[in-house]
Amino acid sequence: MLTAFMGYKAKDAEMSYDFANVVSPDDPDMMYFQRFKETFGEDGNIFVVGMQSPKAYKLDNFRELKSLSDQLNTVDGVKAVISLPNLVQVVKDTADRKFTTAPIFNPMPQTQAQLDSMLRVVRNQVSTMGKSSTRRLELLYWPLLLTLPI
């Protein structure tokens, strides 16, 4: 009898692919996620992996992040990977009177001092955009964004 009732109710079952419905709206991480979506929007074709650790700024870990980014970029269907090691900066080309982009971490830093210097360039770019807090820096630059086809 119970099986028949459950079978009857199964026709009304719906699948939800929105994990936000499972987490309390009062959860601090969910509130942060909602602010992120309000600021940057959302796209079902983007997969975001984020981390928040000062260890990522250490040279060996930074190299590992670069390696991971490069590996993810070779996955079939991945259109782009955006991560700290492959960020670009806007450069003014006075000869051609235009702006171009250039990799910040090219060549890859060989020492911690070189990495720290290059990270200052990133922080300066962020503060130029009016987003100078550490939390905002990680939000903008630490995620690996994978754009996958539908």
Image (cartoon, grey):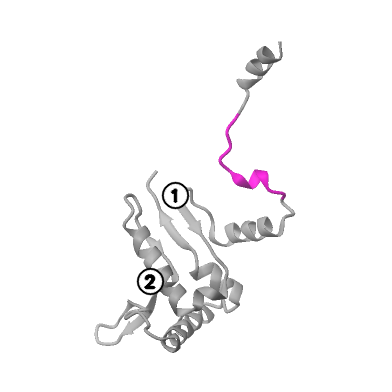
- What numbered label is drawn on residue 86? 2
Task: Name the disc covering residue 7, or none.
Answer: none
Of pointers 2 and 1, the one earlier in the residue sequence? 1
Residue segment shown in magenta: 14-24
* Residue drawn at x 47%, y 85% as measured from the top left: 116
Q: Are marks 2 and 1 in contact (CB under 8 Å)?
A: no
Q: Going by the picture, which residue comes out furthest to the top?
A: 1
Q: Residue furthest left?
A: 96
Q: Looking at the picture, does residue 128 appear above or below residue 53?
A: below
* Left or right of 71 in this view: 135: right
Please provide percent x and percent y for residue 86.
38, 71
The answer to whether 83 is drawn above or below residue 4 in the figure is: below
Q: Quarter of the image holding residue 102?
A: bottom left
Give residue 53's position: percent from left, percent from top.
Answer: 57, 71
Q: Amino acid at mark 1?
A: Asn
Q: Amino acid at mark 2?
A: Asn
- Residue bearing the label numbered 1: 45
Position of residue 75 measured from the top left corner of the image (x, y, whole percent): 33, 53
Name the element at disc 2. helix
